[in-house]
Amino acid sequence: MVIILGLVVLIAAVVVGVAGVLGNDGSGHALTHGFAVFGYHVTGSTGSLFLCGIEVGVIGLAGLALLLTGARRTSRRGSAARRGLRQSRQETAAVSRDRDDLIDQRETARAHAGGAVGNGTPRGDSPSGPATDTPAP
């Protein structure tokens, strides 16, 4: 819908520009004073000056469109990076909570099992091998 509206506005602008150039042509509309841009002297009618103005406006509009497109792209990249960072931080927090829960469960299990087989390590965690119920002589 926006594209159609833009196309209609563009066509209307072209029609107005062409009508302005054709309506201001001839000796009755000659430039009365000298007009120069960057050392280039413009001669002719007010219609040709109007046409030059339209061309400069189109070039300026194209430059502005490119500028805004680049800014929009940069903005989208930045928002995507912030969204990715936020998601990464949420995942890191969830993993940290899970790790803390597992540590708490392990500590709770050690406390309920009595935990010590003589050297302070729970059963099955002995560095010398499998745990036995009889102490070594």
Image: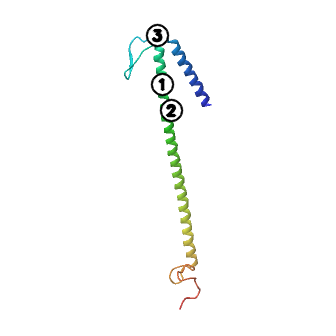
SS assignment at label 3? helix
Q: Which tag, 1 or 3, sits closer to the chain's start?
A: 3
Residue type for callout 3:
His
Q: Mark 2, mark 3: which one is toward the viewer? A: 3
Q: Which residue is mark 3?
A: 29
SS assignment at label 2? helix
Q: Which tag, 2 or 3, sits closer to the chain's start?
A: 3
Q: Is residue 70 above or below residue 94?
A: above
Q: Position of residue 32 (x, y in %)?
A: 40, 10
Residue type for callout 2:
Ala
Which residue is rendered at x = 46% and y = 14% of the image? Answer: 46
Which residue is rendered at x = 51% and y = 48% of the image? Answer: 81
Task: Say if mark 1 contacts mark 2, CB within 8 Å.
Answer: no
Which residue is rendered at x = 49% and y = 34% of the image? Answer: 66
Q: Position of residue 11 (x, y in %)?
A: 58, 23
Task: Say if mark 1 contacts mark 3, CB within 8 Å.
Answer: no
Judged left or right of residue 21, residue 36 is: left
The image's mark for residue 21 is: none
The quarter of the picture where the N terminus appears is: top right
SS assignment at label 1? helix
Q: Nearer the viewer, residue 54 or 125?
A: 54
Q: Position of residue 122 (x, y in %)?
A: 55, 79
Q: Which tag, 1 or 2, sits closer to the chain's start?
A: 1
Q: Which residue is mark 2?
A: 65
Judged left or right of residue 80, residue 34 is: left
Q: Is residue 133 above or below residue 3?
A: below
Residue type for callout 1:
Gly
Q: Nearer the viewer, residue 65 or 132?
A: 65
The image's mark for residue 57 is: 1
